[in-house]
Image (cartoon, helix red, strand yellow):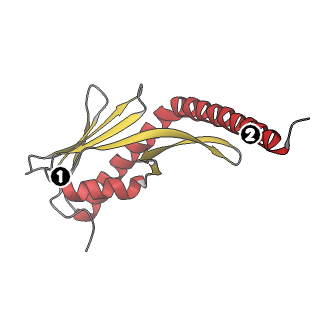
Amino acid sequence: MADESTKRAAQEYLAEKLSKEGQSYEDKLNRETAEKLGPAVWKRVAEMVATKCQEWNSVAGERTFSLKETIMSDLRVLCPGRTQQLTIHFDSRKLLTTIKNTARLEHEKDVMLQIEGYSTGSGREAQLVHRRDPVNLDMMITGELRVLAGLSRRAN
């Protein structure tokens, strides 16, 4: 008969092993979901950028921003009269969206957004994350457009 401490240690071991196996399975499902839904997430990004540019131009009453899609399917937002540009690139193999804004200050780095799958109550979905936190794409794109236009990232 095993003593109580040995029994408890063995039970802890089994619980840890099951936990790791469960997490490994969850990670696999999340990866598969991200791979499957990655193109749809990129489509939402592209639509959001186009919508934000159209909204801005409509409110400004002028063509402040022009949006172009490159041969590589990158998005480029240009602001007439300024040499800077906003480039948004999607790497489908790495499930990575990179936002480069040449109007940013030199010490500010490119924004790297990862597409990750996650569990919902009724299935699985995919989203953009930055440093493991979900991204508010609306605010992020608006902030990038503000910088490109020569404004501060946030309204005062």
Displayed quadrant of residue 89: top left
Q: Please name the amino acid that badge 1 sits on.
A: Arg
Q: Nearer the viewer, residue 134 or 42?
A: 134
Residue beneath the point at 46% across and 51% down: 133
Residue beneath the point at 27% across and 70% down: 155
Q: Earlier in the sequence, mark 1 or mark 2?
A: 2
Q: Nearer the viewer, residue 97 or 64?
A: 97
Q: Is residue 98 left or right of residue 79?
A: right
Residue labelled with disc 2: 15
Q: Nearer the viewer, residue 58 or 85?
A: 85
Displayed quadrant of residue 93: top left
* Coordinates of residue 98 in the picture (x, y in percent): 31, 39
Q: Nearer the viewer, mark 1 or mark 2?
A: 2
Residue labelled with disc 1: 104
Residue occupying the far right of the picture: 1
Q: Is residue 108 left or right of residue 141?
A: left
Locate the C terminus and report the quarter of the image it occupies. bottom left
Categorize mark 2 by other alpha carbons within 10 Å: few (<14), some (14-19), many (20+). few
* Coordinates of residue 8 in the picture (x, y in percent): 79, 43
Q: Is residue 106 left or right of residue 135?
A: left
Whether residue 16 is situated above or below residue 56 in the rendered picture: above
* Coordinates of residue 113 in the picture (x, y in percent): 38, 42
Q: Which mark is residue 17?
A: none
Q: Nearer the viewer, residue 123 or 22?
A: 22
Residue occupying the far bottom of the picture: 156
The answer for how far apart the CA atoms under marks 1 and 2 are is 49 Å
Residue beneath the point at 31% across and 57% down: 142
Residue beneath the point at 23% across and 59% down: 146
Total labels: the figure holds 2
Q: Judging from the image, what secondary structure is the residue with disc 1 in?
A: loop
Q: Would residue 73 be visible to someone looking at this image?
A: yes
